[in-house]
Amino acid sequence: MIRIRFHGRGGHGIKTASRIVGTAAFLAGYQVQDSPIYGAERRGAPVTAFTRMDTTSILERGIITQPNFIICGDETLLESPATGVLVGRENASAVFINTSNLEALKEKVKVGAHTVALDITQRTLAHIGKASALSVGLGAAAVRLSGLITIEQLREAVGIELEELGLDAQVIEKNLRLAEEVYGGLEKVTIQPGKVPPKELVHEMAYDPVLLGTPSILAPGNAEARQTGSWRVERPEIDYEHCTRCGLCFVGCPDGAIALDEQGYPVIDYDHCKGCLICLEQCPRHSITSKKEVRSW
Ligand code: SF4
Ligand code: SF4
């Protein structure tokens, strides 16, 4: 069995990437299984998806802890061990990272051997004009590294999946060109026999006691320690020239990421602002604007 684990953020198309690989593998004659898991269901939050392919029935279920391939769509996820991107990497045949500068990344994070990199974001921006829509590029990378699926099967799978999402023919054509470029820019990796998980794993959700399960915030817990600012795809910025200190953004921020300074002006805590832009919608003076976060591109 070949096990592929995808990591990215809400809005990157991680689930679609795993579906593209699943469909392409199916077209190549394999039995397949693909599934995502989400934490917080919103843009920017970490998302993981899994694809399994085999020549016989797949009875294994749940999360993949021993992947043959790890496909990481956002290098900033590697900075937080809690995202689990490198879990099982010792036995993986390759770790793929979407980055423009693998050497600089290696200085910050121990990614280990068998790491392959390509700047999918830049290619996605060039082909379809939207840097965050990484599904096709990441799917094509996984397909190419596995060496088990042809470019024709990949093209057909991209067409099927994007049509199902309701994309028009022109956009699909651009994505097909992106898929071809990524496929052509990588080489097949020799697949090492992966480590078989100790038992069939099912992701079990822990149930909180009623007091914690109900919306009563008793203390910040570990929320302060979690740098959720790295989830941000859009960055809100306050124009203090036009801010009237009404405080609506302060009240509306669902994450308490806006404080008021001594003069009553709002101050955004970028370590914890997740970029939901509710503050921007709240501001009656349109004093908050948003800018794209620039990280991997
Ligand atoms: S975008 Fe605005 S509302 Fe959303 S978390 Fe950041 S500061 Fe709070
Ligand atoms: S909602 Fe707008 S005007 Fe009001 S405090 Fe926030 S930034 Fe200033």
Image (spheres, grey):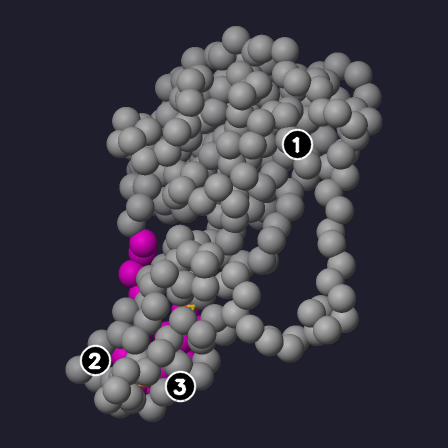
Using residue 90 as the reference point, say whether residue 212 is left or right of it.
Answer: right
Ligand 1 visible in quadrant: bottom left
Closer to the observer: label 1 or label 2? 1
- Whether the residues at callouts 2 and 3 have beta carbons within 8 Å, the answer is no
Circle 2: is it few (<14), some (14-19), or many (20+) Cα within 10 Å?
few
Q: What amino acid is found at the position of numbered circle 1 in the picture?
A: Ile
Callout 1: helix, strand or loop? loop
Q: What amino acid is found at the position of numbered circle 2 in the picture?
A: Tyr
Residue 187 forms part of the magenta stretch: no
Q: Relative to 128, is 44 above or below?
A: below
Is residue 279 at all visible to an observer of this figure? yes
- What's drawn in magenta, residue-wise? 277-293
Whole-angstrom CA distance, mark 2 to mark 3, is 14 Å
Q: What amino acid is found at the position of numbered circle 3 in the picture?
A: Leu
Q: Relative to 105, is 245 above or below?
A: below
Whole-angstrom CA distance, mark 1 to mark 3, is 43 Å
Write down the residue under mark 1: 64
- Residue 208, image x and y in percent? 73, 63
Using residue 201 as the reference point, say whether residue 262 is left or right of it.
Answer: left
Residue that appears at 37% across and 34% down: 109
Residue that appears at 41% across and 63% down: 272
Is residue 182 at all visible to an observer of this figure? no
Which dot marks residue 213? none
- Whether the residues at callouts 1 and 3 have beta carbons within 8 Å, the answer is no
**Mark earlier in primary sequence (2, 3):** 2
**Mark earlier in primary sequence (1, 3):** 1
- Residue 66, image x and y in percent? 63, 26
Closer to the observer: label 1 or label 3? 1
Whole-angstrom CA distance, mark 1 to mark 2, is 48 Å
- Residue 281, image x and y in percent? 41, 77
Which dot marks residue 240? 2
The answer to whether the residue bearing label 3 lies less than 8 angstroms from the nearest atom of ligand 2 is yes
